[in-house]
Amino acid sequence: MFKDQRGIALFMALIIIMFSALMTLVLTGMSIINIKLCGNLATHKKAVYAAEAGKEYARALLINNLPQIPGCEEDINLDNNSSFKINIAPQDNEENLYLIKSEGKYKKSRKKYKISLKISGE
C-alpha cells in the first residue's frame, strides 16, 4: 500500500530543514542591516545636534560681542566626541546682517547649516 512512498518523510524533512535555514539567513541579514541603519541614524543625529549647538553659539557671540565679530571662525570640540565649526561673516549689502555657517561633525557624519541673522542696534 505505501511502498511507492518510501523515503517521502526524509525528503520532506530535508525540504523543511533547508527552508528553515534559508529563512534564518534572510532574517539574520535583515537584522544586521537594521542594526547598521540605527547606528547611522544615531551618528547623524549627533552631527545635527553639534551643528545646532554651533549655530546657537554663533548667535550668542553676535548678540553679546557685536563690535568684535567681523569675520570670526572657530572650531570647538564637545564632550561627546563631536565638534562644530562656525564661520560668522557680515553681509555686504545690509548693516547688522550676518551670515552664520555651522558645520557639526560626529565620526564620519556631517551636517551643515547656513543662516542669516540681523542684530538690532539696541
Image (cartoon, rainbow, N blue to C red):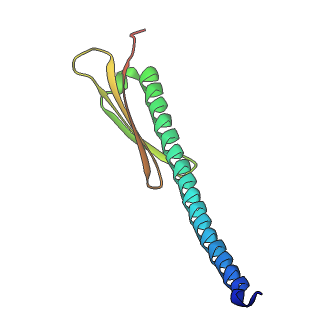
For image coordinates 40% across by 11% down, the residue present is: 120
Q: Which residue is more in the foreground, 29 or 78?
A: 29
Quarter of the C terminus within the rendering: top left
> Residue 72, relative to residue 29: is it above or below?
above
> Residue 98, relative to residue 75: is it above or below?
above
In terms of image quadrants, where is residue 85?
top left
For image coordinates 32% across by 16% down, the residue present is: 96
Quarter of the N terminus within the rendering: bottom right
Residue 60 in the image: x percent, y percent? Answer: 48, 26
Q: Which residue is more in the foreground, 16 or 31?
A: 16
Q: Is residue 109 left or right of residue 79?
A: left
Task: Give the residue furthest to the left.
Answer: 93
Task: Give the residue furthest to the right.
Answer: 1
Q: Which residue is more in the foreground, 47 or 82?
A: 47
Residue 116 in the image: x percent, y percent? Answer: 35, 23
Q: Is residue 63 left or right of residue 15?
A: left
Task: Give the residue furthest to the top.
Answer: 122
For image coordinates 48% across by 45% down, the residue present is: 47
> Residue 35, relative to residue 6: is it above or below?
above
Q: Is residue 7 visible?
A: no
Q: Is residue 67 visible?
A: yes
How many dots with numbers?
0
For image coordinates 28% across by 14% down, the residue present is: 95
Residue 61 in the image: x percent, y percent? Answer: 44, 27
Q: Which residue is more in the foreground, 75 or 112?
A: 112
